Amino acid sequence: WTPWGSWSACTTTCGQGEMKRQRSVALEAQNNGKPCQGGDAIELKGCSQPLCTSIMQVCEWGSWGAWTDCMRGTVPVSCGGGGQRKRTRFSQLNSERLE
């Protein structure tokens, strides 16, 4: 056998993966000689990277604003006189980390 080659990079950038190294037969058996003994041409071993995490954007509603005065168009009126009160709230993106 030739000497083992270097270990490959881990097959994953996060979580559990695998690394590999190889060797080959240095000289094939000839004239009824015995083939190489003593193992495999490829060796595998586990590798561990930092945990996989990602950030997810979640749309959520913000808090309600205050009620406006009663209005009909742009004219302030009493609410019993056909006016309307309004309030608003906005959506917002929040980041959540997933593991």
Image (spheres, rainbow, N blue to C red):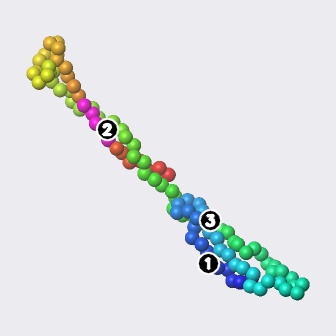
For label 2, count other residues whose C-alpha is less than 10 Å away and answer few (under 14), some (14-19) or many (20+): few
Q: Earlier in the sequence, mark 1 or mark 3?
A: 1
Which SS class for mark 1? loop
The residue at which mark 1 appears reads as: 6
The residue at the point 21 percent across, 25 percent down is 86
Query: Residues at badges 1 and 2 in contact (C-beta under 8 Å)?
Result: no
How many angstroms separate mark 1 from mark 3 (CA)? 14 Å
Which SS class for mark 2? strand
Q: Quadrant of residue 2?
A: bottom right
The residue at the point 50 percent across, 52 percent down is 99
Horizontal side of residue 96 vs 81, given as left or right: right
Q: Nearer the viewer, residue 49 or 12?
A: 12
Residue 90 falls inside the magenta stretch: yes
Q: Earlier in the sequence, mark 1 or mark 2?
A: 1
The residue at which mark 3 appears reads as: 18
Q: Main secondary structure of the magenta part?
A: loop
Q: Position of residue 4 (x, y in %)?
A: 67, 80
Span shown in magenta:
88-92
Horizontal side of residue 78 vs 99, given as left or right: left
Instruction: Tell me: residue 74, above or below residue 27.
Output: above
Horizontal side of residue 78 vs 43, given as left or right: left
Q: In the orientation shown, which residue stands out farthest toward the left?
A: 75
Q: Quadrant of residue 6?
A: bottom right
Amino acid type of the residue tagged 2 in the rendering: Ser
Q: Earlier in the sequence, mark 2 or mark 3?
A: 3
Q: Which mark is residue 91?
A: 2
Residue 71 falls inside the magenta stretch: no
Q: Which mark is residue 59?
A: none
